[in-house]
Amino acid sequence: MSPKAIRRVTTVAVVLAALLGSAFAIGHSLMAQLEPPPTGATANVNATHYADQPPVTTRPSPSPSASPSPSRRDRQPGAGDGPYGAMTTTGSSRVALTFDDGPDPQYTPQVLALLREYRVKATFCVVGENVDSHPDLVQAIVSEGHTLCNHSWNHDVSLGDRSPETIRDDLLRTDAAIRAAAPKARVDYYRQPGGAWTSGVVSVAEDLGMVPLHWAVDPVDWQMPGAAQITETVLTQTEPGSIVLMHDAGGNRSGTVEALQYLLPELLRRFQLEALPTGTT
């Protein structure tokens, strides 16, 4: 082969190598763009908390036959608007703040301190095993004028799918723990974990004299979106009569506590805030 031919072959080889290198770089860049960005959730992948279980949203809409009877629904103003007739509004222009999954020794005292500072009464939906572990916090909740709601023994999202006997035992066990901590406290409400209501759990709760308690505003603070997002959701979605869902336990609730510092004065400027009343069932 002549020197000229060798130079041509060499040139072609260099060009092909350059083109292949460019194609690999472009392909690698595109694959990097398609990979989902890290969310930070892996930091807590092994931590199981009550409120890490998302609300159930795939249940079919309740049929009229599955709803509680009108006589039961009428026992509480505002009842009957939510799943299976659960209560979503206060029945007045007042707004109710509710806190789920406690009591928690780190976050419940912080929430209580802020409520005390702004002279706001709220409703705490407590988990039986946490009540059993921290009866002093239940006493503090009651002594400061807040009301209580049964939130099952251990936040069993699937409790409503169990037998009536199992549901009844769970709710009674939680009630017993609450009354052991605060003997004079009334427990007139029940909130199903995850909002996973069924006709069965509604029926048992009502048979035990408790109003099924749902919500109208959910800032999904269990996902820890940050104080700014929690604040924005609550302020933009809350209307007269809204029941607002937040959490004082079940995970890192520092964002909720921080949000309350902005929410409480602004909500007081717009609405009257109340603890859900007792003695109505």
Image (cartoon, rainbow, N blue to C red):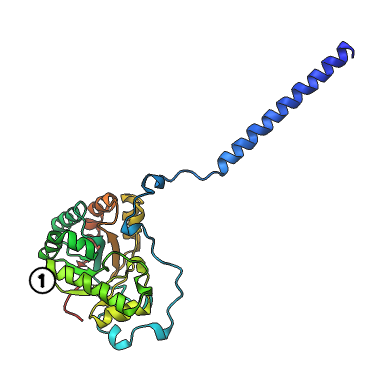
- Residue 272: percent from left, percent from top: 21, 67
Residue sitting at x 15%, y 74%: 186
Q: Residue furthest right?
A: 1
Residue sitting at x 44%, y 72%: 59
* Horizontal arrangement in the rendering, residue 36 relative to residue 195 (left or right): right
Of 243 and 221, nearer the camera is 221
Task: State the quadrant of the N terminus.
Answer: top right
> What residue type is disc 1 on?
Pro
* Above-or-below relation of 159 to 233: below
Q: Is residue 67 visible?
A: yes
Q: Is residue 126 visible?
A: no
User: What residue does disc 1 label?
Assistant: 183
- Residue 153: percent from left, percent from top: 26, 67
- Residue 235: percent from left, percent from top: 31, 59
* Above-or-below relation of 115 to 32: below
* Horizontal arrangement in the rendering, residue 117 relative to residue 49 (left or right): left
Circle 1 residues within 10 Å: few <14, some 14–19, many ≥20:
few
Of 37 and 271, nearer the camera is 37
Residue sitting at x 36%, y 73%: 160
Picture quadrant where residue 22 is located: top right
* Above-or-below relation of 261 to 61: above
Picture quadrant where residue 199 is located: bottom left
Task: State the quadrant of the C terminus.
Answer: bottom left
* Above-or-below relation of 85 to 273: below
- Residue 258: percent from left, percent from top: 25, 50
Residue sitting at x 24%, y 54%: 260
Picture quadrant where residue 101 is located: bottom left
Q: How many marks?
A: 1
Q: Secondary structure at mark 1?
A: loop
